[in-house]
Amino acid sequence: MSIATRLRKRTRAWAKRRHGQDVEPFVIPTRRVYILPTRIGLFYAGMLLLMFLGAMNYANNLALGLTFILSSIGLVGMHYCQRNLVGVRIASGLTEPVFAGQVARFAIAFENDAGMLRHEIRVGADGDSAALPVSIESGQRTVVHVELPAPERGRLTLDHLQISTDYPFGLFRAWTHVNLPMSCIVYPKPASRQLKPPPTETDTGGAQEARRGEEDFAGLRSFQAGDSPRHIAWKAYARGQELQVKQYAGTAVTSHLLEWEQLAGMHTESRLSQLCRWIEDAHASRIAFGLRIPGTDIAANVGNAHRQRCLTALALFGIDPPSNVRADRSDSVRDSTETVGEAS
């Protein structure tokens, strides 16, 4: 580990001990902004010192005047550099889950409530700033993404940000440490398609009487070509959800039951990767599937929300306390009915 990396880690730990955990939305106060001259700033100060000594030696008033003007420009630049950060409002945005081995992109929202433009603001984690600085118009909101590798499944946490700027002349660098609790769910890496999924099973959606098949709502599934337009959940689609079709009791449903015990003999991570692969394949094929792992039992269903729920259960297996959820068919029907009721 290099000296610069160690120094950054110690500085970050010191800032967290001093300021504690921040609560969003966080507004940068004056006392949280640190400022030091850059390399160019040190060179600029050395040049001014030489100009001053030369002007004093030769008693040249014009040279002295030029030196004082350039010095005042540097001091004004230092003030504007610090002022460029003070008052910026910071909050966490939506961070999409990723698979292990991918790069997580944490969304950071910046708001400028001041009556001036904020210039060349950089944001990064562990001292690594974003590729390009951003400017924030007065009264506007800008979202910046901070990338962080996600090498393994679980909950990836980003609890430290460094916000910096060297505006206006690059003579000074002002920065602040922000400790906002942000996290991203990292799904297991899907295994290869060597193992076939378990056999499918077909039921009738829990129907008790086939003649009531067009009256008892049983859930939603993704739209497929040839589905009747009268069964489409139009109100849910108008709210921004994916195009889904209402299923009623008496409707045949083909599904997979993905169980932990079906992969006996494999170690934990291999089982999770294989279950992840089966979930992705079933979702891509629009086949209903259920998940049964120790501590979690999720009934068969379809849709992106169901996929994310199952993948999240795999991602947090053995990390977060098990939910011990028993999601039987009646619960699924009740949840789906509530969803459609809200859409209505």
Image (cartoon, rainbow, N blue to C red):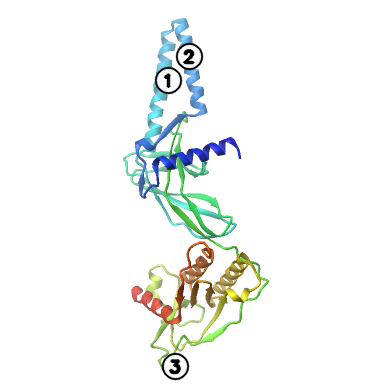
Label 1 Cα crowd, 10 Å radius (few <14 / some 14-19 / many 20+): some
Label 3 Cα crowd, 10 Å radius (few <14 / some 14-19 / many 20+): few
Sequence-first disc among 3 and 2: 2
Label 2 sits on a secondary structure element that is: helix
Label 2 to label 1, Cα distance in Å?
10 Å
Label 1 sits on a secondary structure element that is: helix
Compared to residue 24, the image places residue 76 above or below, namely above
The residue carrying mark 2 is 51
- Furthest residue to the top? 58
Sequence-first disc among 2 and 1: 2
The residue nearer to you, when weighing 91 against 138, is 91
Task: Inspect the image, locate mark 3, and give the three-letter code of the amino acid beneath it.
Answer: Ala
Q: Is residue 331 left or right of residue 289?
A: left
Percent position (x, y) of residue 295?
A: 50, 71
Residue at coordinates 66% horizontally, 72% vertically from top-left? 265
Label 3 sits on a secondary structure element that is: helix
Compared to residue 61, the image places residue 237 above or below, namely below
Quadrant hosting residue 278? bottom right
Percent position (x, y) of residue 39?
A: 52, 27
The residue carrying mark 3 is 210
Percent position (x, y) of residue 324?
A: 46, 72
The label number, if any, that marks residue 70 in the structure image:
1
Compared to residue 217, the image places residue 237 above or below, namely above
